[in-house]
Image (cartoon, rainbow, N blue to C red):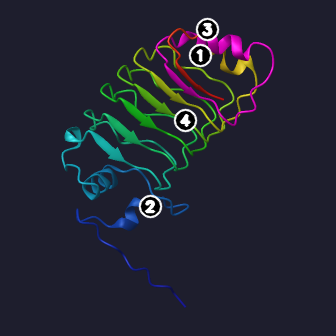
Amino acid sequence: MPVEVCKETSPLGSNRKEELDIFDGLPVMTKLELRRVSLEHGGYHTPYLNETLYLHFKGYRRIENLEEYTGLKSLWLHSNGFGTIENISHLHQLRCLFLQRNALTKIENLHGLNSLVQLDLSENAIRMVEGLSHLKQLTTLNLSKNALRDADSINHLRECVTLTSIDLTKNDLAGDGVIECLTSIPKLSSLNM
């Protein structure tokens, strides 16, 4: 016997069923979905007017369709299913980026985020710190609960001269050179291991 599917209509007049991935039923970060979520959290219909976007706990697999959100200062993308950091390099005003609790294995594609001050990459599967030294405003970095093991995996932090606070708890960091690497970060004043 055929099953009848009830179709929910969003406040913006679209069919919510169209916003789900046809293969696995997971939500897709469409332009319409972004506007709906923005309005749901007291944001604006006009994308570039939004300074904060709450896209956490949605089940998205890809970061996409954020091109019009050029005024963002804070972006909450934690607790989704992202395997890659992508499509955010145009967010030049972004100051805070929350990507914890995803499926990230690599720090990449952060070029263009010249105003970034705070970055949370905790609870991922990152094995090597890289791609951060060009972020000249970055002061706070959370890399707790990742897969960092030794001095080689965190050596890039030496090049991150503006960092003042780093969280590396629950990473099983050990071996020669770990402390030496961390003490060579010139402005570091808060370290959690």
Precedes in sequence: disc 2 or disc 4: 2
Give, as a three-letter code, the residue at label 2.
Leu
Residue with the mark numbered 3:
184
- Start and end of the magenta stretch? 158-184
Give, as a three-letter code, the residue at label 3.
Ser
- Image quarter in which the N terminus is found: bottom right
Q: How far, Cα to Cα, is label 3 from label 4?
A: 22 Å
Is 167 within the magenta? yes
- Image quarter in which the C terminus is found: top right
Residue with the mark numbered 1:
157
| In contact (CB < 8 Å): disc 4 and disc 1 | no
Question: Which residue is drawn at the image coordinates 59% and 11% (left, top)?
Answer: 158
Q: How far, Cα to Cα, is label 2 from label 4?
A: 26 Å
Residue 44, compared with residue 128, is above or below; it is below
Residue 43, compared with residue 89, is above or below; it is below
Precedes in sequence: disc 2 or disc 1: 2
Is 46 on the left-hand or right-hand side of 58?
Answer: left
Q: How far, Cα to Cα, is label 4 from label 1?
A: 14 Å
Name the secondary structure under disc 4.
Answer: loop
Name the secondary structure under disc 3.
Answer: loop
Q: Nearer the viewer, residue 163 or 100?
A: 163
